[in-house]
Amino acid sequence: MTNEAPRQGLLGGAGSHELAAASAAEHDGTMVVTISGEVDISNVNRVAEVIFAQPNTANGLIVDLSQVRYLDSTAVSLLYDLALRLRQRAQRLVVVSPADSPPRRVLELTALSANAPLVEELDAALSLLGDA
Amino acid sequence: MSDHREHHGSILLVDDHRESLATLHAVLEPLGEQLVLAESGEQALRALLHIECSVILLDVRMAGLDGLQTARIIRSRPGTRHIPIIFMTAQASELEEVAHAYESGAVDYVVKPFEPEILRAKVAVFVELHRERGERVRESRARAEAEAVTRAIRTLQILSDVAMRHLEIGGLATELVDRSAELFDADAAALLLRDENLPGLTVRARLGELPLALDDDHVRVGEGVLGTLAAEGRAQILLADELDAEEREAAGLGGVLASVLAVPLLTAGESMGLLLLGACDEDRFGQGDLELLKLAAERMALAVDHAQRYADGRLLVETLQRSLLPERLPLHPRVQVAARYLPAGLAPQIGGDWYDSVELDGERTAVMIGDVVGHGISAAVTMSELRNALRAFAIEGHSPEMALRHLDRVVHATRGPGMVATVLFVVIDAANGTVTLARAGHPPPALRRVDGSVRFLDTARTLPLGIDVEDLPSEEVYPMEPGETLLLFTDGLVERRGESITQSFDRLLDALVGAPTEVEAICDHVLAQTATEERRDDDVAVLAVQLLGSAVGPLELTLPARAHAVTAARHRLRVWLEENAPELDSVARSDLEVAWSEACSNVVRHAYGPADASFEARATREGDQLQLVIRDRGRWRARRGRFGGRGLPLMEQLSDELVIERDADSTTVTMTRSIAARGPEAAILGS
């Protein structure tokens, strides 16, 4: 199902120099939201819109931050919020963030892993949700 | 010419060419208004003695009295002074006369051959304004006769003027309260209006040292004394002595006030507000006051309703327009760009102003601004086409001159005659320290030098695109030093009724002289100093471009407390760190970016007051110590926005030392961090 067109492209209007981009695609029945660029207070609500617009699939949601260059506490709070919502529906959030990447450090400092597993690669995230 | 005394709001068409008059007649006939034709200035002036006129279309070039002379005479007569004049210029070369046209009282101008649809829309706006004004005048006349109260007329006129003057609900509510209290000699006053977030009516504006004491500033429709009046649409004088304790409380008479005049604001029979006037004695307000205030309340209700509709319409238009403009301008290492767009204030509609910016390579940045003549969807679509085309030419590597020549061809090929657009295209070369610009009919950019002096880069005047394929823009090159700022704008920023172009341009230069140093703050300052919020006739786009100097030395920013400023601050710090602390590893660099952004985000979320609050951000290096200081003016308050609350712990963990100092009117966050590598124990806290 990966041939599906992204549900949402650049986060913004007609311009092509947006701070971040987010797209969603289905991998074997699991929705993966891929975010790239920088997420801060100025665009976190737009990122949230893309994420919360995704269909409710059985096992959970993967948010792939491999392409993210900068991420701050507003984005962390968004992920917390998302993890909580999914847990209430007995679903899981898995976050992909390679070690030594800038987002990874912020996610560790804010202890996101207590609420959502942090993995290095998308494949690991898929198998984690697939096993559940 | 027959006598048109009976007709209200004729449109007067003045042109010494019969064919032109015939064309105008055909274009404007669908409006269904009386059209009066005059073949000379003299004939027009004679006609104006006999007709009531809503708008005049006046040819600039005419035999005998020309358009400008005719306009001056019209302006000098008390009976015709208020009539809006739209100038028509037959040839593009007459555009030079536009400045004179505005001086002689024009409100607008069109270039022939004009787009019928645009001309019709323009004229329709003035006809509508005239009709509204006529209705108001007629209504107040009829009522005055019925009432035969001189004071009533004055009171109503004053309040109607207030209602007319404001398009924005906050200012309207405040002034209605102030003026009502003054006219009725009240000791206290309050206006309650519907609030979309709450049931019932909420205090929107109040006045008086002895305030009306309402519980929670709120009245539930149908409950209590005031709520009942509102529900029934009934006005009444309430006396404290005639009410029991509970009723007194509910009527706002819990304090020292002895009487309250309460009048509901009704639209379509429904209460949309409540006006309360209070007095310390019982006999301040009589039955006559009650009747008069009821009449005034009708006007207030109309004005409030209009302001609320206006706000809704404006929001829609702003959203639509913003979707056509770049969401965010690119971030260049050496060039800082900020932009603002304001829709027209007269009536919310889509405009044709646009801007864009493209990073051409590491050193060169293209910045464009333009204005498609006209409003509405077709102008917006054209604007979008031109923006995309010009962007493509810029990316292809065309020089400003060539890009505009290509664009002119696009205009001719795709839009046909009658479509007119002005464009200014600038390329800033940070390596060479130059700015290359070409403009087609667009106002020149203003340059502010490091020493604070300002001037326009006034290249040879050329025609707007779409007028003459033979008259092509050419480019010129100017030096641009680091620290200098270029201000690009559309004519909505400088056009103001009753002011000459020279005065307007001077005002803009003055605003730029007094502006702060940072581009975001410059845009805000220039807009605040030049654009009037209410009754703005045209949309406005303004863009500030700054060539950044060497980043060695302290980084000092003053930024508006808005979310986008956080991004700008972070990118400035990123560049600054590269130059001032090159030995930092990538982890430390990104730590500092996060700490700095979090502190800035805190300001944006917590800064007290409206959107024009600002904050200061400063980065310095002393030896191997880096210090980041973020200072806002105003106390922190409950956070705004959805996602927040984790910033402070991050700031603590990412800096060696975090100090927050609060005093009465500012909060200062100081973070220090050593450039020396941190121990591994500090690297992963809390994982």
Image (tube, coloured by chain):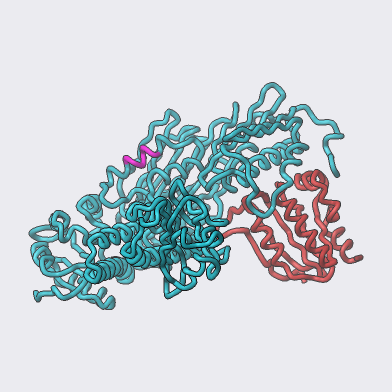
| Residue B510 on the magenta span | yes
User: Residue pushed farthest right?
Assistant: A131
| x and y percentages locating residue B277 in the rendered image | 41, 57
In this picture, is B222 found above or below A9?
A: below
Count of numbered labels shown in the rendering: 0
* Segment tinted magenta in the rendering: B506-511
The image quadrant that residue B351 belongs to is bottom left
Residue in front for this viewpoint, A49 or A26: A49
Residue B449 visible in the displayed image: yes
User: Residue pushed farthest top?
Assistant: B623
In this picture, is B685 found above or below B248?
A: above
Question: Is residue B245 found left or right of B498 in the rendered image?
Answer: right
| Residue A9 on the magenta span | no
| x and y percentages locating residue A86 in the rendered image | 80, 63
Which residue sits at x=74%, y=30%? Answer: B657
Question: In terms of secondary structure, what is the magenta stretch mainly?
Answer: helix
- The shade of chain B is cyan
| x and y percentages locating residue B152 in the rendered image | 27, 62
Image quadrant occupied by the N terminus of chain A? bottom right
| x and y percentages locating residue B53 in the rendered image | 19, 67
Residue in front for this viewpoint, B216 or B490: B216
Image quadrant occupied by the C terminus of chain A? bottom right
Residue in front for this viewpoint, B129 or B115: B129
* Letter of the chain in red: A
Residue B385 visible in the displayed image: no
Residue in front for this viewpoint, B464 or B124: B124
Question: Is residue B477 found left or right of B581 in the rendered image?
Answer: left
Which residue sits at x=85%, y=63%? Answer: A126
